[in-house]
DNA sequence: CGGCCCATGTAAATAGTTACATGATTAA
DNA sequence: TTAATCATGTAACTATTTACATGGGCCG
């Protein structure tokens, strides 16, 4: 929908700060573009350049636009993400289910280490947000970053609750 | 770590209410058990039964316990989940990035429909939590459900912010 | 007798990651 | 001259999903 554009640019312009680290991988990006082309949803035009590698510019077709509209309007498969993958795709949370198999001190340590990671992540999302605001990115996109930020701030609070629960258990139950 | 146990029971006892719908699929469960067995992390013993299908009971071995401890203590790959997959695995959020390609009324409608789904999900997680409390499940596990609940409640608020942002844009900018 | 629950799996397909391969320009 | 950035891609592997396949017991 932001055509014409080429693979490398799509990759580097979209949420750059966060995707730099966990970026769309080439092994998925280029085959995906090829597949969209085969399906007639985008068309390729090569931009020949002397001062750098050639660029394969893709433009969306009418049927591409239709397919996009169908995707955007559909509600299919939206539940998994926010209800379920949220836990399933979170290795730390999965480990938390087995926290009782660690000594309380070890468990507490694990939480502290993780807490620092979350704080680091908050700072990075904040920087990404500022950067996006400066670049006058669509407000909807910035709101997505807000979502991520609120998630992480909630997570910090939750980690503290978890820590408190462990300490409490340690002091009372003792095994 | 809760051995001996068999596939079908693992599947149905673990977070049953939520997993009923998005359950571990058989195509991954049984091959995974086989793989763990091949690696010597678990051992199989068949429980022959007359009043129903036989059960393949698996018990964890010493090396299984060691591997489990290594996994639990490691911090590897924990970042992706909470920083990145959180957005990437959420089809609704991805669509929100393209909300400007919908008419404001359509966008608002999409948000309202999603909001109802989130409310439904909250009720189901609450029921799961009560059920787990009655069954005296480990408090760590219940805290995971709390995490999910807090995520969803945060999401409701965020959806309202998103809705407000769209209404504001519609009234001022027009286009 | 039909359908659901129990219980085991396999096969085929799709999705996703990692590593490899190439080659030009530009900045330290 | 070495490393980074720009730009394209493929190959091999791993993960995940979906659909299929089987068969007994139990309930209405």
Image (spheres, coloured by chain):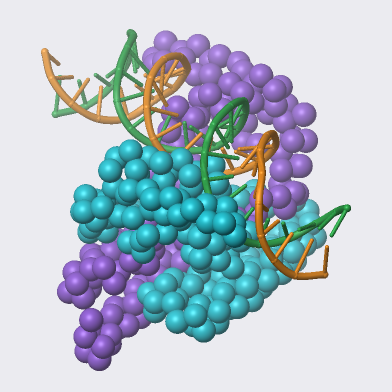
Chain colours: A cyan, B purple, C orange, D green
Q: Residue furthest bottom?
A: B172
Nearer the observer, A64 or B131? A64
Question: Residue B118, can we see it?
Answer: no
Above/below status of B173 relative to A65: below
Q: Is residue B3 left or right of residue B9?
A: right
The location of residue A160, given as percent across then percent down, is: 64, 72
The residue that appears at 75% across and 42% down in the rendered structure is B69
Q: Is residue B71 above or below residue A100?
A: above
On the picture, is B157 further left or further right than A174?
Answer: left
Residue at image position (37%, 60%) is: A4
Q: Is residue A149 left or right of residue A68?
A: right
The answer to whether residue A124 is visible is yes
The spot of residue A40 in percent (x, y) is: 28, 43
Vertical relation: B50 (above or below) A99: above
Mark count: 0
Q: Position of residue B13 (x, y in %)?
A: 47, 39
Q: Residue sitting at 53 percent across and 24 percent down? A: B31
Residue C28 horizontal/vertical position (percent): 82, 70
Pick the front one: B28 or A106: B28
Point out the image quarter for the C terminus of chain B: bottom left
């Amino acid at each position: 929908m932001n055509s014409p554009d080429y693979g490398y640019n799509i990759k580097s312009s979209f949420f750059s700060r966060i995707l730099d680290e966990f970026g769309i991988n080439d092994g998925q990006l280029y085959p995906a573009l090829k597949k969209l082309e085969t399906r007639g949803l985008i068309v390729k035009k090569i931009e020949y350049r002397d001062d750098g590698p050639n660029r394969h510019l893709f433009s969306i077709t009418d049927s591409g636009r239709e397919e996009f509209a169908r995707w955007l309007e559909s509600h299919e498969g939206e539940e998994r993400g926010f209800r379920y993958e949220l836990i399933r795709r979170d290795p730390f949370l999965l480990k938390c289910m087995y926290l009782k198999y660690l000594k309380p001190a070890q468990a507490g340590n694990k939480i502290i280490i993780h807490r620092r990671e979350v704080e680091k992540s908050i700072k990075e999302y904040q920087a990404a947000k500022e950067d996006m605001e400066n670049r006058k990115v669509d407000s909807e996109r910035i709101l997505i970053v807000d979502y991520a930020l609120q998630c992480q701030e909630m997570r910090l609070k939750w980690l503290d609750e978890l820590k408190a629960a462990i300490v409490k258990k340690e002091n009372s139950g003792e095994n």
